[in-house]
Amino acid sequence: MPAGYVAQIVEKNVFGCATELVLDLPRGFEAHPGQFLHVRCGGDGRILRRPFSLTVSQRGELALLVRPAGEGSRWLCARRVGEELDFLGPLGRGFSILDAGEHVLVAGGAGIAPLRFLALDMRKRKLRPSLCWGMENEEDYGTLPEILAGECDLSLATRDGSAGFEGTALDLLFSQARTESAAIYACGPRDMLSGMARWLGEAGRERAQVSVEERMACGVGACRGCAVPVTDAGATYAAACREGPVFFARELDWERM
Amino acid sequence: MEAGLRTELAGIRMQNPVMVCSGTWGNGREYAEWIDPGALGGIITKSVTLRPCPGNPPPRIWETPSGMLNSIGLENRGLAAFLEEDLPWIAGFGVPVFVNVAGFSEEEYAEVAAEVCASGLAAAVELNISCPNVKKGGLHFSSSHEDAARMVSRVRERADLPVFVKLSPRLNDLKGMCAAVARAGADGLSLVNTIPAMSIDVERAVPRLGNVTGGLSGPAMHPVAVLAVWEAYQSVGIPIVGMGGIWGWEDAVEMIMAGATAVAVGTVNFVDPGAPLAVVEGIRGFMTRKGVARVGELVGLAHRGGFRDEGKGRAPGSG
């Protein structure tokens, strides 16, 4: 059951452009990969919570992996070990691990967060996913790829070619040979997700799940602020916070995204 | 719940004066996982329209200093689904349900209000003639005192429950508007809706909201709402539900002292689902501290010179 919590930050690691905050969560706190915490961030005049996907640390503890993008995430990255975070969670619908011969994770930037958590769940089921992860340049990664290489079949992409494939995570995905029936799990910028949805075609969208990032107010489905267009004729929009943030690619209306 | 917090609003008995604002609490299901709806003074449901309404294109929200903009655009599943699935469920908690009604013509408002009354499950109708987020309808119906009064009369003819009228703070003559809708048969006022507002992304030079304009809510607009309640209290005798940026019990008490018989908390629900009940507890604590026996004694108190009689300005035992 989601609830309100105050949890202490017990460990902080900086990996390139992203900061990992490991949380001391109460016994019995259970979450699925793709779910998020709705965190109260400080800063003058900021009132709304900010959603952050749950990730896991190297030891498998639940954590946040935050890239400073706006005021809320900058505030969060500046927290220190011992400080407490006020959040609601876990919220939203997470990923479903499909019955497939091949599992491909596609991460753009900080979109790695929920996918690292998913990779852990897959390993527990004796699955070994492959992961395509894209960043702007080599410095953005920090030492995280070295750790991840032990957790999945990792390949990297950078826009400037400073590490791995030259291009985006999506370019990297396109460049690799895949079986038709591969299940795809993606999290990253909107452009990346919509580019992937177009590339996949109708059949591929059945086996692809995407985690969308939206501005949210309530985080529980009440305000309808984080609307994303869906293909379901009866619905028109879904609330990313409750019906998502993970959707099957076929559920979203990419023309209107 | 002891007697002190009980109140009565247009004949509707409430266990406390704290409700939740329309549109900030869905139809209760999302927040029933977080707090007991049965502990609220009342529930104001999300705007319902005759037919399903998809709402506005995203982005629909943007945070502003101490506030937020929204342009949800009345997204709802329509009257039939509301009456069949939502209203019976939320009415089951035994607290008064005020059904917020919106539409795109006078006939639609009247039709929806009539059906809501016929359901036997609602306590009151709240007419949303102040939504800033729909081009046709919404604010259009309060563009003049005559239009608003005609709307209220049309609904009044077909509604056998108390009718509350929710107004925008952006009116040239709020007092005149309050008087006009009261004369037309409104049983109460809900003050206020969000303030029409917008924000522009300067890097891209485009509006932040898909709908271009939206409504401002949150602490930033609270003083605007207090003034509206203050002015309405001076101009009409019908009860007022005060709403707009209430974040804690002080804001609620402020509204009551400005003239509100009850209050509704809105945007703070998004941040703290427990806020409405914290406001109830805060009012209770304030009344104890001030030696106020019934919350009704606080209604409009700031118009009457404040705490000065019978030692109520002093803490109990202070002298």
Image (cartoon, rainbow, N blue to C red):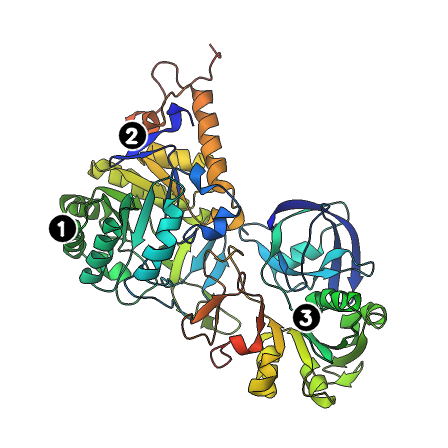
Identify the residue at image location x=38%, y=24%: B4
The mark lying in front, picked from 2 and 1, is 1
Residues at circles 3 and 2 in contact by the CB criterion of under 8 Å: no
Viewer-closest of B161 and B69: B161
Residue where numbered disc 2 is placed: B303
Q: List x then y, in percent, for residue A245.
A: 58, 66
Viewer-closest of A56 and A74: A56
The answer to whether residue A42 is left or right of residue B26 is right
Residues at circles 2 and 1 in contact by the CB criterion of under 8 Å: no
The answer to whether residue A166 is left or right of residue B256 is right
- Quadrant in the picture for the N terminus of chain B: top left
The mark lying in front, picked from 3 and 1, is 3
Q: Amino acid at mark 1?
A: Glu
Q: Is residue A42 above or below residue B259?
A: below
Q: Nearer the N terminus, badge 2 or badge 1?
A: 1
> How far apart, in angstroms, are the residues tagged by discs 3 and 1?
57 Å
Q: Residue furthest top?
A: B319
Q: Amino acid at mark 3?
A: Ile
Q: Which mark is residue B157?
A: 1
Q: Is residue B75 above or below residue B116?
A: below
Q: Is residue A154 above or below residue A32?
A: below
Query: Chain letter of disc 2?
Result: B
> How far apart, in angstroms, are the residues tagged by discs 2 and 1?
34 Å
Identify the residue at image location x=38%, y=20%: B293
Identify the residue at image location x=24%, y=47%: B174
The answer to whether residue A22 is left or right of residue A4 is right
Can you tell which quarter of the image residue A232 is in?
Answer: bottom left
Can you tell which quarter of the image residue B111 is in?
Answer: bottom left
Residue where numbered disc 3 is placed: A97
Q: Amino acid at mark 2?
A: His
Can see residue B155? Answer: yes
Identify the residue at image location x=83%, y=58%: A59
